[in-house]
Amino acid sequence: MRLSPEQIDTIRATARETFGPEARVWLFGSRLDDQARGGDIDLMLESSEPIDNPALLAARLSARISRRMHGRKVDVLLAAPNLRRLPIHEIAFTEGRVL
């Protein structure tokens, strides 16, 4: 995994601030490959509660993490009971790791 312990702590803390303590954050995509270089940070936030205004909250989480990580590009996907599940969710759940 190509994230430092400090970066993981930043992601977790920011997710808790934005979505509460029950939310789980998954890392998926190229950052899981220790041999790869570069790339954005692909995150999926999983909530057991419905999420209102998902686009706004995903953008807010992405921007907050990006600012705290000195401009690193962060893509955020949301998974909640009231949101449609897409093939990208299956990739995140099967290939991703909970932070």
Image (cartoon, rainbow, N blue to C red):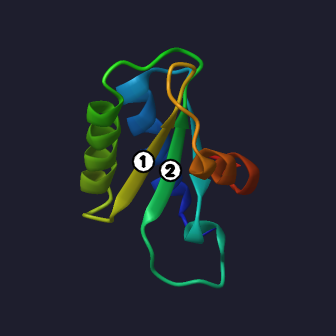
57 over 5 or under it: above or below: above
Q: Residues within 10 Å of mark 2 (few under 14, many from 20)?
A: many
**Amino acid at the residue labelled 2:** Leu
Q: Residue 53 — which label? A: none
Residue at image x 38%, y 37%?
A: 14
2 and 1 marks in contact (CB < 8 Å): yes
Left/right placement of residue 54 relative to residue 39 reads: left
- Image quarter in which the N terminus is found: bottom right
Choose top left, top right, bottom left or bottom right for residue 69: bottom left
Residue at image x 58%, y 64%?
A: 29
**Amino acid at the residue labelled 1:** Val
Q: How many angstroms separate mark 2 from mark 1 (CA)?
A: 5 Å
Residue at the top extreme, as displayed: 49
Mark 1: secondary structure: strand
Q: As rendered, which of 13 and 75 lies closer to the eye? A: 75
Position in image of residue 95 (x %, y %): 72, 57
Q: Residue 43 — which label? A: 2
Left/right placement of residue 69 relative to residue 93 reads: left
Residue at image x 25%, y 48%?
A: 63
Choose top left, top right, bottom left or bottom right for residue 38: bottom left
Position in image of residue 77 (x %, y %): 47, 44
63 over 51 or under it: above or below: below
Left/right placement of residue 35 relative to residue 66 reads: right
Identify residue for label 1: 76
